Image: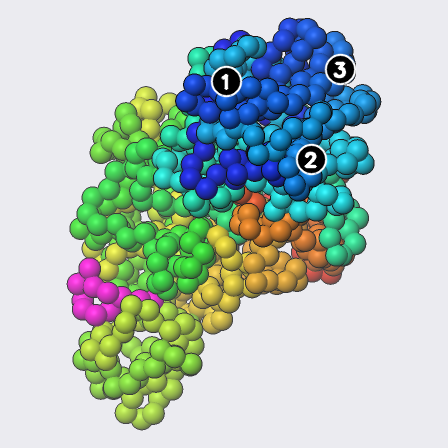
Amino acid sequence: MLHIDGNTEGITYTPGPGSGLVATLIGAQDWSLAFWLYNTSASNRNIWQSYQATGTLDQLRLTTTGSGQNLKAEIFDALGVSIAQITVNGVWPDPGGAPGWALCILTNNYDGAANATLELRCIRSDGTQLATGSSSAYVAASTGVLDRLRIGAALTNAPTSAALGHYGPFVLRRSLTSDAEAAAVFALKSPGMLLQYSDGTNWTNSNQAYFAWNHFSASHNSDQDGGSATAGLPSDWSPASNALPSNIALLDRGVTNAIWGVYGTDLAISAGAFAHKDANNAVAGYFTLGTPSGGTAVNFANVAGVNPALRRLADNTPFGIDRILFLSNSRGSRISYDARTTGGNWPQHYGGGVILQRLANCVGAICQQPAGGTGSAQFGLDQSAAACASGGALTAESAKSENWTRVGYGSNATDSLGPGYTLEIDPAGYKQYLWSDVTGSKFLKTNARRFRGLFLAYPGSANVTGERYTGATIDAAGTDRAGTDHAVTLETQTGSVTAGLVGLNMGGTPYVEFNKADVVGAAPAVGQGILASATASAGSAKSISVVMTVTDTGTTYVVELDKAFTGGIASTWNLYWGPLSFRWCAVDYAASEFADAFQGVRFTPTGGGGFAPLLVTIEAYATDVSGWGIGSTGWGGNGYSKHLSESFNQTPLSAGSDQAGMTLYQAFLLALGLDALVIIPAQQDSTPSDMGTVADTYRDSGATGRVAFVADPAHGRNDNITSGNSWGVQDYSAWVAWIEANASAYGAVGIGSAWASLGVFADQPPRGWRADGVSHLTSEGNKVWAASVLSALATASLSTTGTSARGRARARGRSTGIMGA
């Protein structure tokens, strides 16, 4: 929704080549222009002015008449002369009062030969469907051809002042409209249904929409026509959030690559400013949310289970620090951001929404991505414009086809080999992270705080030391603060071969073979990590895997690998092996110890092997107050089946590992020391039961945190506007039904009601809940989803300790099995 409260406020759109708006809004074409408007001005005003820029000749005008009570539509010829008009009286009988909203649909009815007539249907917010007539016939071919559009104030030709009030989406469809269809769309009380409705005799699918303005399918823009993209939900969608060319989404089918938004040089704001408003907050309680449905029956039910941490979270009654992780796909790991009035730049993931709902008692963030560059924002770690300082080369592995991505979680690269977001730190350099206070939370320098990173100890790794650093800016080299540094050993090598290989195979069952006589140190063992590198230098091409089996042929060892080496291994490469472990490197600050705005940790490689320390995740949280440490992660574009199969999740780690007896995937989750793991559907290439497999895999590590299954909100189908009904609800009903049917057997809380938390997809974009199309939520969308989940958890999460078929009694403490935790 957009709000206009000034006479001169308006926006100009200049259609590009191939514009569906230009091609559709002509006389010789059936079309319907539908919109919602809450008019508050008791005088004659402009709503829509499409025109020819040369001479500013009107082509189509929508205006109020009769002191703002009536709606008039008028179409013009190529010389700007009126050729047809129609007026409906009493649309807003008391402008600014009740009834306020009106659904208006202007239809051009072309006879297929020479003539056309205008029809205008209006339904007031009290449900009164006003009498509809037709204009006199006009010569269809005589209409002017537009090359500009104004919404709000007109440039010339009275009336020029903007109609004041709330503007919903405008949607131009190539179809006629019947009275019954207008009534059906009105009854849905959803602005987005102007585009999505497809159950009529004329309105049959969203492909009929050739133009739509004002956040019809995305609350953000995703630039598709060469302009510069601007991330950001504008100022919380508050009344003070001014609309800009960079934050108004529109569809113009036919414009090159315009999938779900064009803007930039195509849009211009006039004097004054629109303001964004949530569709519901504009006039509280008027628009309603639809109910998603699919092929599997869903009860939107919640299943009770013991989960003390989630009960405390729901009740907002902290006791100690609860560490809670929300797990999914990109909707759990997305660190693209919105600009908010509260919290500044804010990540677009589920956990971020929960933090917004419980900000006052949030002590910090867990399981953050160790992002090495600019363009992201996380809790307290806003690297949108400037990156934290570093020395030497950094290699971010999250977007690469390397086995390092099989370690941990957090990748948003759909084509990475695994779910991990990892960062290699140059052995001759360093990597620093400085966090700022988060206003309104407990993550403040006036509280004692801990900053730490989780590293993979592997054969050949350099060791690492954590040092306390503070600075005036996030990218400052900073000041080394005297205190207790934390040195962590990451080198675990027990044996190696540097004389070359006698055999290797990276297809089918991957293996390497080498002479026993060439082994330096101990023989390799099942469950150890094995590193392959082209040379012994830090910058060498290299890859990691886990030893599956070791066969002694008498003269050689044949080592079967969990996953094939990446990086183009050759017979001349070196091999190093030894235990794999996760180890924390942490530094602590006393309350109010330093005044610098940015405080944190520098990780510096120190001795050990010659290869880069591998940083897997980072955390920052207050330690002397009670509250929530919230994390959110996943793997973009990939479901749970691949999370499990593409991680190192086959072979238990060897003796000598800090987490011996569990897989590396399990070891990572155990390292987080969770009080609660919230498993949210990650559907790609997966089945609902994969959520149960994740829960079992986590529990089998010996982790003491309790599990919950929580439904995600309804999503759209396809960003591609050439797909019929692209923005219908994607059918994930089977996932919700699985939660309702199976949570109890897993001894877990189950929240099925969350599927309806944001209504159907068409409800979401005009409310500011959709980031970039059908897949991702804005921070506001996540916040609203979180409110629904927390409300459900208040009754479904039980605080009493108990057991169940797959549950275990849990103590208040937690076990991580991790050094340096």
Report helix, strand or loop for mark 3: loop
719 vs 54, left or right, is: right
Circle 1: is it few (<14), some (14-19), or many (20+) Cα within 10 Å?
many
| Residue 702, horizontal then vertical, whole percent | 56, 59
Q: Nearer the viewer, mark 2 or mark 1?
A: 2
Q: Which residue is disc 2 drawn over?
A: 109
Q: Nearer the viewer, mark 3 or mark 1?
A: 3
| Residue 793, horizontal then vertical, whole percent | 70, 40
566 vs 649, left or right, is: left
Q: Nearer the viewer, residue 728 or 18?
A: 18
Circle 3: is it few (<14), some (14-19), or many (20+) Cα within 10 Å?
some
Callout 2 touching callout 1 (CB < 8 Å): no
Q: Which residue is disc 3 drawn over?
A: 89
Report helix, strand or loop for mark 2: strand
Query: What residue is drawn where x is 46% and y is 19%?
Result: 56
Precedes in sequence: disc 2 or disc 1:
1
Query: What residue is drawn where x is 48% and y is 61%?
Result: 665
The amino acid type, in three-letter code, at marker 2 is Asn
213 vs 558, left or right, is: right
649 vs 93, left or right, is: left
Q: Which residue is disc 1 drawn over?
A: 10
Distance between mark 2 and mark 1 Cα atoms: 29 Å
Q: Main secondary structure of the magenta part?
A: loop
Q: Which residues are magenta?
A: 533-544
Let me know if residue 542 is in the magenta part: yes
Precedes in sequence: disc 3 or disc 1:
1
Distance between mark 3 and mark 2 Cα atoms: 21 Å
Report helix, strand or loop for mark 1: strand
